[in-house]
Amino acid sequence: MRSQKHGVVPDAWSLAVTTCSRFERVVLTTVQVDPAMAFYGSSPYTGDMSGTGVVLPASPTVAAPASARRYLVRLCGLRIGPNARCIIRSIRQLLTIGYEQEMQGGLLLPVELPVSTPNWHFADGNVSWHLRRVDVERAAFNRRFVDVPLAVPPFSEGTAGLTAAILARNPSPGSYIPLNRGMPYGTDVAGLGTFRDIRYPWVLGSAGSDLGLEILGPADLLFFASVLQTDPERRPRPIEPLPDLSGMTPEDRFVFLHPGARYWRVGAELIVDICNPEGGGLGAPIETPILAEMADGPSSCGIDTRSSAEPATEGGDPG
């Protein structure tokens, strides 16, 4: 299938495209610290407590005005070079609800349920998703920047980054104020600039289809989620006794049985092919000091190094 182009095409672009016969496939995934891994670690690498997705603060964001109190979460991103392009092949969305179950010894065990019903949301909370393209000036393209380290919660007070983070003017869960009035920045990509459902489930994603969404550089490709966190203490509760749960969605059954449930984790995955005739298509290097001692270990940059170069034809499926 032919790719859908997004961005300004330079005069020399058509020539550059015809000479690009190989694409580098990259998997971008939301990676951040998972508090549940604090005591045991999540991989063989010393100090690694990371997991897939951003574990959200429990503090509700229903205080007025609600539109400016939503958690603005940058899920993953990629910087595309001045003469490069990337083609989004597939998307996956990760969203869970959960609560903490007290165990022996006073430990709290997170219990999570993936949200699988496309349009499900709490009575007083919801999540929207935003795939955006952000222009990057050529002069600024090669500047180094320090991206968000792995942390709990992963607050960031700046927009110049690619890694998973909750973007905040004041990094405090109790009085959270989002950057940019909670509005995802950048321009719409193929009508996915704002959508409100789980249309690319984590289990299936866009498997079986090639989205073929083409983004032209220089630009940052960013995927955001905007989360209106529920307030379990104030949201409406069912009248006792509980109704018949057999006909309810899995999410409604979970919430009825566990009234303290809230939005727990949000994440995403993008599989993209990058073509850069001049090399260096992944953009400026990212410095993450907190991971300096974890040689060959996990990275918070959201770029899965399982990627490999694969041949592809123009507008087609690589391989």
Image: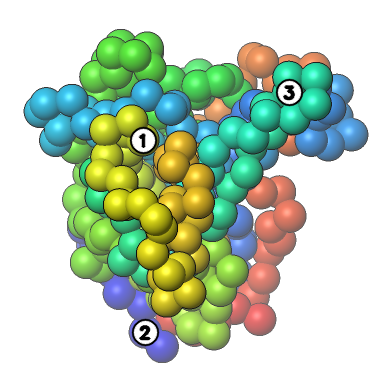
Residue bearing mark 3: 107
**Residue at x 25% of width, y 24% of height:** 178
Separation of disc 3 and disc 1 at Cα? 21 Å
Q: How many marks?
A: 3
Q: Where in the figure is residue 85, as x and y percent of width and height?
A: 41, 59
**Residue at x 62% of width, y 43% of height:** 111
Camera-nearest label, 3 or 2: 3
Q: Amino acid at mark 2?
A: Arg
**Residue at x 59% of width, y 69% of height:** 203
Question: Which sits in the foreground, 316 or 245?
Answer: 245
Residue bearing mark 2: 2
Q: Which mark is residue 205?
A: none
Label 1–label 2 contact, CB within 8 A? no
Residue bearing mark 1: 232
Q: Where in the figure is residue 265, as x and y percent of width and height?
A: 51, 42
Camera-nearest label, 1 or 2: 1
Q: Going from the N terminus, do you reach mark 1 or mark 2 first?
A: 2
Q: Where in the figure is residue 282, as x and y percent of width and height?
A: 53, 45
Q: Residues within 10 Å of mark 1 (few under 14, many from 20)?
A: some
Q: Quadrant of the N terminus?
A: bottom left
Q: Amino acid at mark 3?
A: Leu
